Amino acid sequence: MYFKKIVFLVLAPIIYSLSYSNDFPLRKKYSDLTPISTKQLIKDYDKSVIVDVRSEFEYKVVHIQKAINLPLSKRSFYSKMKKKMLKNPNVPFVFYCNGITCSKSYKATQKLHDKGHKNIFVYDAGVFAWVKKNPKKSFLLGDSPVDTSKLIAKKDFQSKMLAFNDFDKGASLKESLLIDIRDKFQIKFIPKFKFKNKIKTITLTKLQKVLKSGYLKKEKTLYIYDAVGKQVRWLQYYLEKYAYKNYFFLKGGVNSVKKNK
């Protein structure tokens, strides 16, 4: 009995550490930051400044109620954050992005930590963990409370992903449209599609407006690609909202095609 207790005491920290790393794989890399749980954020919600560090487009799709959007990718991120923190010196600031494998919230918090700021926390469970627990304090496509049944499951997103050969084959059919949603600065490589002349370049924001207008015929199948296969995740919400059912995405975006060449 005594031996079993000794073994348990020795192995318990190791087992806990492994479990901890699997649940939040990036915490080890950013070990000097302070994470905040969903349960704790619910308690601290009213007194905290919550910052969404994702892109504006992602924020418009889904975000925590009262969260401000300051994309980490913007050069003005730190200067704007510094001003807000100076105006609210005793208020906790909480940073979030898309979940446990999204590093933006960690990087944002780390940037401020390295500059000597205190009372900062990383909500690494991410926006979807919050929405599922707190639909009344969340927005999805501008609506609150959130109807959680409208959250797109990972399997439903993956079901729309096609490898290059299948994507190219489908895009070459008569009743299809091939759409590049990359911004100009991202267009450094164009895959060798069978019918390059079919490509329509429509940025993500513009395409959202086009979908809303109903300009694209729903009888046609849309073959849409981005840089790395991540932006299309957010576009899917608008495709579903405006009842477009015939669409597919290029798995991994054009960068994955480039790597395989």
Image: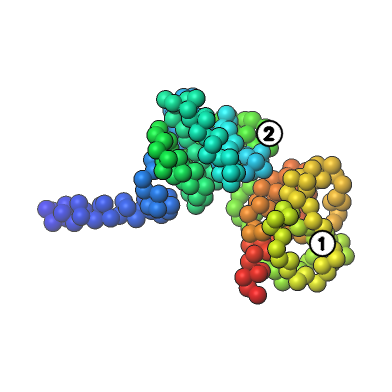
Residue at image position (20%, 55%) is 10
Q: Secondary structure at mark 1?
A: strand
Going by the image, does 17 lie left or right of 117?
left
Residue 73 x %, y %: 58, 46
Identified by mark 1, the residue type is: Ile
What is the three-letter code of the residue carrying label 2? Gly
- In this picture, residue 236 sits left or right of residue 38: right
Establish if 46 lies above or below 40.
Answer: above
Residue placed under numbered mark 1 in the picture: 199
| Residue topped by disc 2 | 142
Q: Which residue is at the front of the view, 37 or 205?
A: 205
Query: Where's residue 149, x and y in %?
Result: 63, 41
Q: Residue at x 70, y 48 (%)?
A: 235
Residue at 52% in and 29% down:
84
Q: Residues within 10 Å of mark 2 (few under 14, many from 20)?
A: few
Q: Which secondary structure, mark 2?
A: loop
The answer to which image quadrant residue 242 occupies is top right
The image quarter containing residue 55 is top right
Residue in the image at 65% along x and 41% along y: 56
Of residue 16 and residue 179, the one placed in the foreground of this image is 179
Nearer to me, 150 or 181: 181
Q: Is residue 230 above or below residue 32?
A: below
Percent position of residue 155, x then y: 61, 55
Spatial CA distance of label 1 from label 2 is: 31 Å
